[in-house]
Image (cartoon, rainbow, N blue to C red):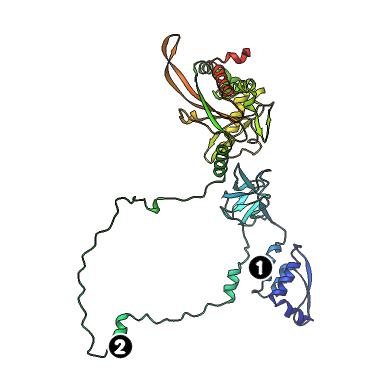
Amino acid sequence: MASALTRLLRRPAAALLVARSCRHVKRFGHQILLPGGSVCSETAREFVRFIPRASLYQIWSRSFSSENGDLVAAVVPYMGESITDGTLATFLKKPGDRVNVDEPIAQVETDKVTIDVNSPEAGIIQEFIAKEGDTVTPGTKVAVISKSSSGDTHVAPSDDKVVKDAQPPSPPTQTPPPTTAVEKIDRQMPKGEIPAKEKPKASSPLPAKTSPLEPQLPPKERERRVPMPRLRKRVATRLKDSQNTFALLTTFNEVDMTNLMKLRSEYKDAFAEKHGVKMGLMSGFVKAAVSGLQNQPIINAVIDGDDIIYRDYIDISIAVGTPKGLVVPVIRNANGLNFAEIEKEINTLAKKANNGTISIDEMAGGTFTISNGGVYGSLLSTPIINPPQSAILGMHSIVSRPMVVDGNIVPRPMMYIALTYDHRLIDGREAVFFLRRIKDVVEDPHRLLLDL
């Protein structure tokens, strides 16, 4: 019986079957019949000693060979309802580094946000399973973490290494040097009949043929090819879908910023002291947009098939440019917020967007978008609608220009504003009235107080 079991365990296929049957336990006692008929009761780790090292059992046993169950896997978390996969962008740690519970060890980039992969336990990173640039889904294992304090890592030998150990390298064979054409002629011609070598004729170098019509392209060494980030792919797809779906039309106007800038200059210190946030110009435009949407509700509506959906709430999306791409966080129920609450919400969302910690819920929805290209110095532009919305307001830089006021030419801080709208739903009349309302409220903020 003992000899039969020994012969059975020496077979790789049988050893593999034994290993698979024991993977569900971490530590077990097992009676083993040794050669000669002796019996011993040992753990699984001791049981491995009786299997040949070249056996496949050694590889499979690594999956359950931790005696105290101290190996845990860090997996990709749930990324959102509409996100099915992402790209493993970068590792924040290295193998051998110590990590704490819920400490980020890697970042996964999706087409909307960047998600952290956190460590489930405190310990030491043993190895990384995935690689940077891999496409991962929720539940994908990224790293193996050892909860023990020891920094020793046990890595399973690879299949290639086992094959190399089993097959010793064959001794190199010496190949004869290739026979040249001159040696072949010497062997064929008898002695004394070797023809005299002719002197090569000096050939004049031919001029390089260049066509004056062919463009001289730069060498490929001066170019760099990098994969497009998922966020940039998502932005490109949405903008192109907007152009293909909507009947885009843009109307323009100009706003005198004198009174709004004067209001901010007079109350900025008291405003910051009471509310803990600086008073900017964006809150004034958000309040003006809310007033315009209330006067022209069709701009807050959207087409859905053969129906028009009128929305009785106003969620303003603010376009924010980040190093990774354009994101559009949403100010919820902007019609019920005052200047201070709007400024606080804008600052909070902008910080999260730049840090890459903004969530999908904070960017979902939105009924109208404001894009402020003026912070980058843009003088005039035609913004593109953010689907599935029906319009977008573009702000631009403030430039001092000569204006006629009461018959006199005076310098005024002026801003061009643009409204791009879906002409399938919104007529030019409603668009012009909306933009005119923006102009009136910004030029005279007292209209908001008096509801005029």
Query: Is residue 266 depicted above or below 428 in this figure?
Result: above
Q: In the rendered view, does 143 fall on the left or right side of 251?
A: right
Q: In the rendered view, does 399 fall on the left or right side of 303?
A: left
Task: Return the x and y of residue 47 as percentages of the image width and height.
Answer: 73, 71
Residue named by callout 1: 59
Toward the top, the furthest residue is 406
For the point 48% across and 24% down, the residue is 416
**Mark 2 burial class by Cα count in 10 Å: few <14, some 14-19, many 20+:** few
**Image quadrant where residue 55 sits:** bottom right
Quadrant (top left, top right, bottom left, bottom right) of the C terminus: top right
Q: Earlier in the sequence, mark 2 or mark 1?
A: 1
Q: In the rendered view, does 123 fall on the left or right side of 224?
A: right
**What amino acid type is highlighted by mark number 1?**
Ile
For the residues labelled 2 and 1, say whether their Cβ atoms are less than 8 Å apart: no
**What amino acid type is highlighted by mark number 2?**
Gln
Residue named by callout 2: 188
- Towards the viewer: 386 or 421: 421
Label 2 and label 1: CA atoms lie apart by: 61 Å
Query: Is residue 390 depicted above or below 174 in this figure?
Result: above
Quadrant (top left, top right, bottom left, bottom right) of the N terminus: bottom right
Nearer the observer: mark 2 or 1; the answer is: 2
For the point 67% across and 71% down, the residue is 56
- Towards the viewer: 401 or 207: 207
Report helix, strand or loop for mark 1. Answer: helix
